[in-house]
Amino acid sequence: MSVQQVEVPIAARDRDNIVAGDQIVRHRLATRLIHWSVALTFFIGLITGMPIWTPVFKWMANLVGGLEAARVIHPYAGVLFFIASAVQFFHWLPDMHLHEDQKGWLRGKAFSYMRWEHVEESGKYNGGQILFFWAVCLGAVGFLLSGIPMWFPLRFPVLLREICILIHDITFIGFVVGVIGHIYLGSAAEPGHSAR
């Protein structure tokens, strides 16, 4: 990763990997806005989808005006999540290919990383981040394709709807586990963090 030295922090709005003052700015403003759009639409979908999924989380519906409001908001949040994920896909795609020294992530390098062992690799993103990117993209497609028959149930056969409910649930559980790991690795597990 090459890092450019600049004097003006405003340069961080349109360039990646620059030194602005005493900080290294890894992502330009557009990249950060796209990432947070994906996160925001995911959490809106989470808050509106959980009370639909099970009554245990019915209290979450109160955050958006009740269960009926959650039922209306949820599919639109899902579509927005897919659109934001698609924009992110095309924005980050050039950097999201595993290099030869990153293929160990498919054979257990992730466990070394989770134990805070140093992982030396080429490229802007490590292999785990690249694999997570592809998992998010696949999950976004899974959410959309399984969500459409659930949104318009009378237009699809019962068996297909039941399969889509299962796919939606499995995708959701995978996403929650992945997002928790993503937040942990981006905060508490960062080198130099006080929790380390």
Image (spheres, helix red, strand yellow):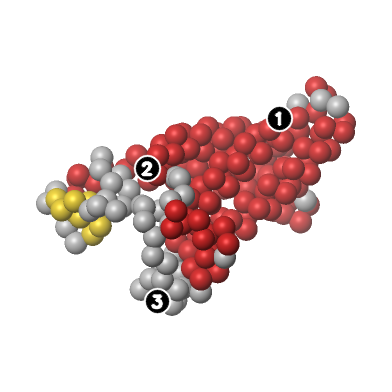
Q: Is residue 2 left or right of residue 35?
A: left
Q: Are marks 2 and 3 in contact (CB under 8 Å)?
A: no
- Which of the marked residues, 2 or 3, is nearer the chain's N terminus? 2
User: Can residue 40 be seen in the rendering of this structure?
Assistant: no
**Mark number, residue 156:** none
Helix, strand or loop status at disc 1: helix
Residue 148's disc number: 1
What residue sits 25% from the left and 43% below the top? 15
Location of residue 76 in the rendering, given as x and y in whole percent from the top left corner: 61, 32
Amino acid type, mark 1 = Ile
Please, is residue 50 above or below residue 163 in the view?
Answer: below
**In this picture, residue 181 sits left or right of residue 117:** right
Identify the residue under disc 3.
Answer: 194
Residue drawn at the location 78% of the way across and 52% of the way down: 55
Answer yes or no: is residue 155 visible. Answer: yes
Element on which disc 2 rests: helix
* Mark 1 crowd level (few <14, some 14–19, many ≥20, 10 Å Cα): some
Q: Is residue 70 above or below residue 122?
A: above
Q: Nearer the viewer, mark 2 or mark 3?
A: 2
* Residue assigned mark 2: 31
Residue type at mark 2 is Thr
Q: Residue at x 65, y 44 (%)?
A: 48
Q: Position of residue 34 (x, y in %)?
A: 42, 40
Q: Secondary structure at mark 3?
A: loop
Label 3: how many residues lie within 10 Å, few (<14), some (14-19) or many (20+)? few
